[in-house]
Image: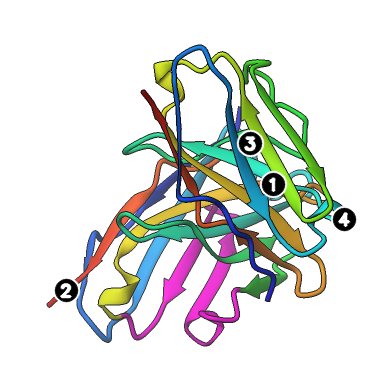
Amino acid sequence: QVQLQESGPGLVKPSQTLSLTCTVSGGSITSGHYYWSWIRQPAGKGLEWIGRVYTSGYTNYNPSLKSRVTISLDTSKNHFSLRLTSVTAADTAIYYCARVQLGFNWFDPWGQGALVTVSS
Amino acid sequence: SYVLTQPPSVSVAPGQTARMTCGGYNIGSKRVHWYQQKPGQAPVLVVYDDSDRPSGIPERFSGSNSGNTATLNISRVEAGDEGDYYCQVWESSSDHYVFGPGTKVTVL
């Protein structure tokens, strides 16, 4: 059974770059036909889809974040990554990674989430 | 961009049925997915493709979708069903995923 685990710094300074990794266990990130996504949730608020990367490397992003986001695969480490540049306090949130199977547009499974705080 | 609406809260007595809606323009033409999120935990898929349940999700969870409203029902509600419930669709025209704002379910 595939499991996802987020990791990365829990504190990032304003104007710097947020970087997170989602490690996939129990299966290869390149096997099957899957989109690997990032979703975030500010404290006490709802879920916001950030973007996704396909096993081919194809990406697409939420327009509201597109200018600042990069999602990439590292097949040698069986993980995918999120980079969000020029962060502000508004980017403080729990960041989740999740999987979507091609042709089926729901998220399952999810990682447990990683809290990232933007503060000086 | 496509917008989903959900009531902020629903309260229900144990053993009764909780009904929560997810509104969107012509949402009946889309496939709606529902997630349960308990405090401090990641969301969990409870219904996909309007009305199907993943393995391990009780039959008490059921969904429907027609017109401009999708509905998630939880029958025979238990204290453990408390949490936030989010609907989600894939917007084909923009190739993006959209979440509703969530409904907080409180068991009285």
Residue with the mark numbered 4: B29
Give me the chain letter of mark 4. B
Q: Tell if the residue under mark 1 belongs to the same chain as the one under mark 3.
A: yes
Choose mark 1 or mark 3, whichever is in front: 1
Instruction: Tell me the kind of residue under disc 4.
Output: Ser
Q: Are marks 1 and 2 in contact (CB under 8 Å)?
A: no
User: Mark 1–mark 3 contact, CB under 8 Å?
Assistant: no
Q: Residues within 10 Å of mark 3 (few under 14, many from 20)?
A: few
Output the chain of dot 2: A
| Residue ID for mark 1 | A106
Task: Tell me which numbered mark, 1 or 3, is placed earlier along the sequence.
Answer: 3
Q: Quadrant of residue B57?
A: top right
Q: Is residue B60 left or right of residue A9?
A: right
Q: Earlier in the sequence, mark 3 or mark 2?
A: 3
Q: For this rendering, which residue is in front, A63 or B39?
A: B39
In the rendered image, residues at marks 2 and 4 fall on the same chain: no
